């Protein structure tokens, strides 16, 4: 089993920044990829960004140029740097990780952006 714990959420003003962290622990034999999804009230969960063990990254069009994903270092942690935040970025952000072919989810962290 692998546990994912998110941190760094909170309240920010429009135009501000937040940095999310996701720490993986447990029976980790191989990290395939990690990433972030988000879910706003009344909306479906959507992909925000992913990073593979090889360092390849993908981003949702809505966050390209504003968000940056990094990590997967020896500490099994991924980061999401969020800049130029907009009120529409308000959501619960969930960390997702694929380890040895098995996918795990974190419990989520709330991000609220005020206008």
Image: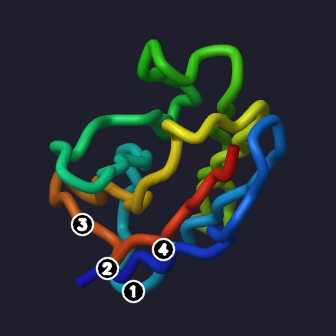
Label 2: which secondary element: strand
Which quadrant of the structure image shows residue 19?
A: bottom right
Q: Which mark is residue 96?
A: none
Name the residue that disc number 3 marks.
Answer: 104
Contact flag, marks 3 and 4 (Cβ < 8 Å): yes
Q: CA distance from mark 2 to mark 3?
A: 7 Å
**Residue 45, position in %: x, y?**
22, 46
Q: How is the image coloured?
A: rainbow
Distance Cα–Cα, label 4 vs label 1: 7 Å
| Side (left or right) of 55 relative to 28 | right
Give the CA separation, mark 1 to mark 2: 5 Å
Left or right? Give the position of 5 relative to 12.
Answer: left
Q: Secondary structure at mark 3?
A: strand
Q: Which residue is rendered at x = 27% and y = 56% of the image?
A: 41
Nearest the eye: 64 or 13:
13
* Residue depicted at 34% across the width and 57% down the height: 97
Contact, mark 2 vs mark 4 (Cβ under 8 Å): yes
Q: Which mark is residue 24?
A: 4
Image marks 1 and 2: residues in contact by CB distance under 8 Å: yes
- The residue positioned 66% from the left and 31% from the top of the image is 67
**Foreground tag (4 vs 1):** 4
Q: Mark 1 or mark 3: which is in front?
A: 3
- Whether residue 111 sits left or right of residue 15 in the image: it is left
Q: Pick the residue in front: 12 or 9.
A: 12
At mark 1, the secondary structure is strand
Q: Left of 32 or right of it: where is 90? A: right
Q: Furthest residue to the front?
A: 115
């Amino acid at each position: 089993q692998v546990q994912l714990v998110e941190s760094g959420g909170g309240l920010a003003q429009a135009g501000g920044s937040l940095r999310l962290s996701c720490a993986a622990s447990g029976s980790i034999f191989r990290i395939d990829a990690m990433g972030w999804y988000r879910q706003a009230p009344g909306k479906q969960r959507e992909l925000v960004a992913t990073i593979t063990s090889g360092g390849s990254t993908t981003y949702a069009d809505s966050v390209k140029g504003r968000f940056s994903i990094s990590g997967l270092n020896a500490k099994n942690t991924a980061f999401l740097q969020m800049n130029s935040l907009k009120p529409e970025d308000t959501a619960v952000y969930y960390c997702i990780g694929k380890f040895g072919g098995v996918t795990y989810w974190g419990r989520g962290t709330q991000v609220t952006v005020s206008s």
